[in-house]
Image (cartoon, rainbow, N blue to C red):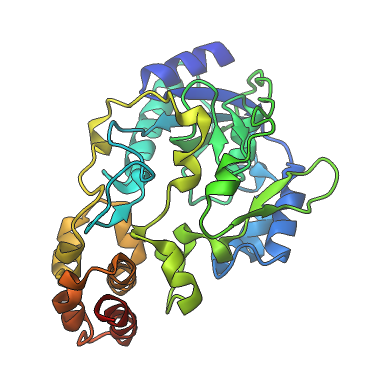
Amino acid sequence: MTSATVKSLAHSAGFHLAGVTSALPLAEARYYAQWLAQGYGAGMTYLHGRRAEMRADPRTLLPSARSILCLGMLYNTPLPYSTQFDLAGRAWISRYAWGDDYHDLMRLRMRALADRLLNIQPFDYKICVDTSPVLERALAQRAGLGWIGKNTCLINQHIGSWVFLGEILTSLDLHPDTPTPDRCGSCTRCIDACPTRAIVPAQAGPGGPAWALDSRLCISYWTIELRGPLAEEHRPATGAHVFGCDICQDVCPWNRRAPTDAEHAFDPRHAAPPLDQLASLAEDDFRKMFSSSPVTRARYEGFLRNVAVAIGNSGDPRFAPALQRLSQHPSALVREHARWALDRVVS
């Protein structure tokens, strides 16, 4: 089986990007270890320990692996970016979470692709989508899918950075593609636009990345992964964001002409919902509204915490009754943030 055959079948299976790299130890693992040592992983303990060590060599997941098929699926949609949208009275949810959970769709298509390949030739394989301990952006760059930009997202010169990544580790010996060179040049728009200055000098040494993401300063980390209270000094910078942040991608010139995807699973259902609607959600309502959506990762209490902060940042006194209700919520986390927000809308 040839690399050309594999990539052709990948495109016919619905993947916009496909490339091959060798299943060998990654020099980039050293930079990942430095990133963790600098504390940039914040409270994401699952990034440390044995799972961190496994990322250095893909063969820890599949000992027979010789090649890795790297795949990308576009999720851009026609709605405006957060930097262009009138968010008065509304919350912002990251573009990747507007539709169905991409993990499910990606795995489904990757299994179907693997089955088609197995009809041609038997081989061992393992499917990885985001949660597996692999350095997927480094692998994708090596496979020619794009380069890792200053905002630390993978960027493809033809379709931008609104891309979900996945990998099929395989025992097939496939010809590898050529790594993609960096094409960010002198542009610093993502760095300049970040409201929390979360994109910082990497200090990775010669040959390493020039810029890194400090999760401790990232709105996406605060609104998705952080458990517990959001530090008061950080709350104003989150603006209307209640799940994730797209600013560093919204301003990227490579996304200016990014095509939109026809995949209906990613059609926007929850791009910018009204804040008062979100503030009134009971836990069952939250689960129903965001069923099959990545938004549930924030958990109910964390999501209401984010909603309260977004309402406080709006400064709109119309939301005072909603905050009054949240200030009586059974969760101490929600109550504290609602009272903080109430002080901002009634003062």
What x and y, as percent, mark residue 152? 60, 44
What x and y, as percent, mark residue 77? 31, 33
Quadrant location, the N terminus: top right
What residue sits 58% from the left and 47% below the top? 192
Query: Relative to 217, is 26 above or below?
Result: above
What x and y, as percent, mark residue 257? 43, 23
Query: Relative to 53, is 338 above or below?
Result: below
Look at the image and tell me whether residue 1 can be seen.
no
Asked whether, in this view, residue 258 is left or right of residue 209, the answer is left
To which quarter of the image does residue 39 belong? bottom right
What residue sits 36% from the left and 49% below the top? 94
To which quarter of the image does residue 119 belong? top left
What residue sits 33% from the left and 36% below the top? 108
Look at the image and tell me whether residue 165 can be seen.
yes
Image mark count: 0
Q: Which sits in the foreground, 257 or 203?
A: 257
Q: Which residue lies furthest to the right in this view?
A: 206
What x and y, as percent, mark residue 27? 77, 43
Query: Relative to 88, is 112 above or below?
Result: above
Q: Which sits in the foreground, 248 or 55?
A: 248
Asked whether, in this view, residue 2 is left or right of residue 25, the answer is left
Q: Which sits in the foreground, 132 or 201?
A: 201
Q: Which sits in the foreground, 346 or 97?
A: 346
